């Protein structure tokens, strides 16, 4: 099934609404059937193709995907969002901009999540985060004040000035 032509020249910027962005993709990324008619991909078809994709180990049931489309479930994992974006990106019309997880979630959310994952690969950072998670709110405020003081003492090279 080849990617269809929605007639648009660029994707609208998502308004931070995952459900709306996902449904926009279902409506916009289409294919031409054997009779030359433009068709939208069905929820069961998309779920099956994502699950069958050998390039990742993400599985998505049609029920789960339907829950994402209806807004009953609004908290998919990054892996699921990336798999959905990959499915639609591979079938987008020629000349259309790439469809990414950032489109579905908003760039900031994806970048923040990836930055957090990168930072948490350091054992010391993980240890600090785990210990901070066990602190009272007052203790966390004190810790943040200490970190701010250390940032100020470390000089202009880490603050972006100079």
Image: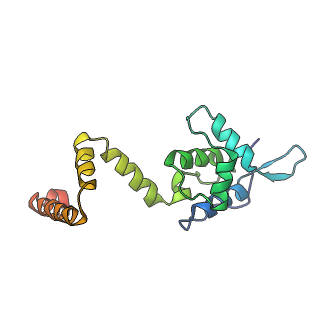
Q: Nearer the viewer, residue 131 or 29?
A: 131
Say which quarter of the image contains residue 22: bottom right
Say which quarter of the image contains residue 103: bottom right
Say which quarter of the image contains residue 70: bottom right
Picture coordinates of residue 31, whole percent (x, y) = 77, 48
Relative height, residue 29 to residue 139 (above, below):
above
Relative height, residue 86 to residue 135 (above, below):
above
Q: Is residue 109 left or right of residue 53?
A: left
Residue at position x 57%, y 39% in the image: 58
Image quadrant for the N terminus? Answer: top right
Picture coordinates of residue 120, whole percent (x, y) = 31, 45
Residue at position x 55%, y 50% in the image: 81
Residue at the extreme left? 153
Residue at position x 12%, y 59% in the image: 150
Q: Is residue 87 visible?
A: yes
Relative height, residue 120 to residue 6 (above, below):
above
Image quadrant for the C terminus? Answer: bottom left
Q: Is residue 3 visible?
A: no
């Amino acid at each position: 099934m080849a990617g269809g032509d929605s007639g648009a020249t660029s994707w609208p910027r998502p308004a931070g609404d995952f459900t709306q962005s996902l449904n926009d993709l279902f409506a916009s990324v289409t294919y031409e059937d054997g009779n030359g008619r433009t068709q939208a991909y069905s929820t069961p078809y998309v779920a099956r193709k994502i699950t069958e994709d050998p390039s990742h180990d993400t599985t998505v049931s049609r029920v789960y995907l339907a829950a994402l489309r209806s807004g009953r479930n609004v908290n998919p994992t990054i892996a699921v969002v990336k798999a959905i974006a990959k499915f639609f990106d591979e079938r987008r019309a020629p000349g259309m901009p790439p469809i990414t997880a950032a489109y579905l979630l908003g760039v900031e959310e994806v970048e923040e999540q990836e930055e957090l994952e990168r930072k948490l690969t350091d054992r010391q950072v993980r240890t600090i985060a785990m210990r901070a998670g066990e602190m009272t709110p007052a203790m966390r405020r004190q810790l943040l004040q200490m970190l701010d003081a250390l940032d100020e003492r470390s000089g202009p090279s880490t603050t972006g000035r100079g």
